[in-house]
């Protein structure tokens, strides 16, 4: 882990360090002392900007959730046939996951042990529900296989997308680009979900 220099410390750099430490140690296993050492600043300097580690958690998770919910507001997610809207949401979810990898990784690892984690889990369920509704509409339009339950299909689709956090590492030699990964997810998932015409 890189130590931040005191003279370059910002709330944004503190958040990035906190997310890295939370992902390495787990939120429950991280103390303010761990955050202080990793950021290279005193605990009092951290408290000058945030109330504590749960506020850092909420800021980090909010960044991930804002990215995901922003997808649902994009024109391609709101207009057109449900199947195209669903493909857009799935593709963009994969892209946002890779763009905001540490933040989304943290979001996917919350377990509901704090108020912030319970709030995050509720928001994730809300996002999943909206995507499931799109999937149901695409099935009602006859564009998705009728023999796969919409809730199950949603879980399988997002299980595939969410698994990217476990293996995707940008910039590693020979690694696929985020665009290539997102397109592979769409081709693989929708080849099995779309009705054969």
Image (tube, rainbow, N blue to C red):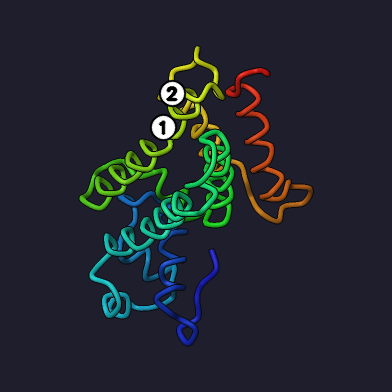
Q: Which residue is mark 2?
A: 150
Residue 96: in sight, yes or no? yes
| Residue at numbered disc 1 | 132
Which mark identifies residue 181?
A: none
Residue 185 point in image, percent of width and height:
63, 36
**In this picture, residue 104 sits left or right of residue 188:** left
Find numbered disc 2 in the image and state the secondary structure of the residue it sits on: helix
The residue lying at 58 percent from left, 38 percent from top is 84
Are the residues flagged by discs 1 and 2 in contact, CB closer than 8 Å?
yes
Q: Is residue 171 above or below residue 123?
A: below
Closer to us: 167 or 79: 79
Q: In the visual, does 94 lie left or right of 172?
A: left
How far across and down, in percent of the image, does residue 64 sit? 43, 55
**Outermost residue, left direction?**
115
Q: What residue lies at 37% left-to-right and 66% top-to-bottom?
A: 35
Above or below 182: residue 52: below
Residue at 44% x, 18% y is: 149
Image quarter for residue 83? top right
Q: From this viewpoint, which residue is outermost toward the right?
A: 174
In the image, residue 132 above or below residue 12: above
Q: Position of residue 1 (x, y in %)?
A: 53, 63
Q: Residue at x 68, y 18 (%)?
A: 197
**Crowding at mark 2 (Cα within 10 Å: few <14, some 14-19, many 20+):** many
Q: Earlier in the sequence, mark 1 or mark 2?
A: 1
Residue 22 or 121: which is nearer the viewer?
121
- Please state if 118 lies on the left or on the right of 190 as rendered: left
Residue 192, by quadrant, is top right
Q: Could you tell me which secondary element the residue under label 1 belongs to?
A: helix
């Amino acid at each position: 882990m890189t130590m931040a220099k005191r003279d370059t410390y910002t709330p944004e750099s503190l958040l990035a360090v906190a997310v890295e430490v939370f992902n390495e140690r787990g939120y429950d296993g991280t103390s303010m002392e761990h955050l202080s050492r990793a950021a290279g600043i005193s605990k009092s300097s951290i408290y000058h900007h945030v109330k504590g580690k749960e506020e850092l958690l909420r800021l980090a998770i909010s960044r991930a959730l804002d990215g995901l919910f922003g997808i649902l507001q994009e024109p391609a997610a709101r207009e057109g046939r449900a199947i195209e809207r669903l493909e857009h949401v799935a593709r963009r979810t994969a892209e946002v996951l890779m763009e905001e990898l540490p933040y989304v990784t943290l979001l996917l690892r919350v377990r509901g042990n704090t108020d912030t984690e319970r709030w995050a889990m509720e928001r994730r369920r809300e996002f999943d529900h909206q995507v499931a509704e799109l999937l149901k509409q695409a099935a009602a339009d006859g564009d998705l296989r009728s023999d796969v339950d919409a809730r199950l299909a949603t879980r399988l689709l997002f299980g595939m997308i969410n698994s990217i956090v476990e293996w995707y590492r940008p910039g590693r030699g020979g690694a696929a680009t985020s665009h290539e990964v997102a397109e592979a997810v769409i081709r693989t998932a929708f080849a099995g979900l779309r009705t054969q015409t």
